Image (tube, helix red, strand yellow):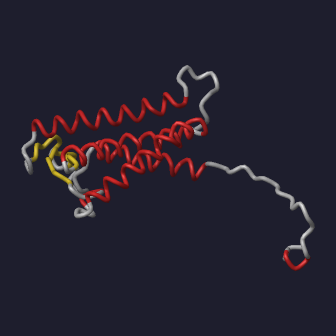
Amino acid sequence: MTDLPSRSPLSAGAAFWLQSLAWLGGDQVSKHLAVAYLDRGSSQVVVPGLLSFTFRQNTGAAFGVFGAGATILVLVAAGVIILLSVYGPRAMQLSRSLGLGLACELGGAVGNFLDRVCRGYVVDFIDIHIWPVFNLADIAIVLGALLIALFVLHHRPVEVDVQPDEPQAPWSNPGA
């Protein structure tokens, strides 16, 4: 992906926040519907053998791992949210893929953070039968990680030719 054009009608910061809010909004609405219409542990088949909506209360981290450390998860998530909020809009100015990746990460992190703080657990309901049950926030986090990985793989760092201020001794520069 390329950098944002300088004449973009939407500033890089606004694009970052809109992307984050879109993921957060979709996540929270879908979880509200799951809580309202699915009984705990029940499953509604959407596409037989492929997709069901199965209500789960996840007290752990990703896919139920680290269940006993809810306080630690909340604290770590709060720190990540702060960092993403500060650096995400700046990253969008550097690269769309990096900025959108961080926006996805923020939307997903806030969605699961709100569940943890308000409900004491994260609502998971998307069941594809070959993977643990998950939610839209998890999708945003995985998509964000993929976009960040694309940025890292395709980003070419600027090479800077640094010349030392003082001549070095011959033994300190093995290539000389």
Can you give x and y, in whole percent of width and height, for residue 1 in the image? Answer: 57, 39
User: In this image, 79 relative to 150: left or right?
Assistant: left
Foreground residue among 25 and 86: 86
Foreground residue among 133 and 123: 123
Query: Residue drawn at (86%, 59%), measured in percent from left and top?
Result: 163
Foreground residue among 35 and 128: 35
How many numbered marks have been drawn onto this rendered protein structure?
0
In the depicted structure, whether residue 116 falls above or below residue 14: below
On the question of residue 19 being in view, the answer is yes
User: In this image, 83 relative to 159: left or right?
Assistant: left
Query: Residue drawn at (10%, 41%), measured in percent from left and top?
Result: 38
Can you give x and y, in whole percent of width and height, for residue 160 in the image? Answer: 78, 53
Query: Residue drawn at (50%, 48%), measured in percent from left and top?
Result: 148
In the depicted structure, whether residue 135 falls above or below residue 14: below
Q: State which quadrant residue 69 falls in.
A: bottom left
Of the 4 image quadrants, the one containing the C terminus is bottom right
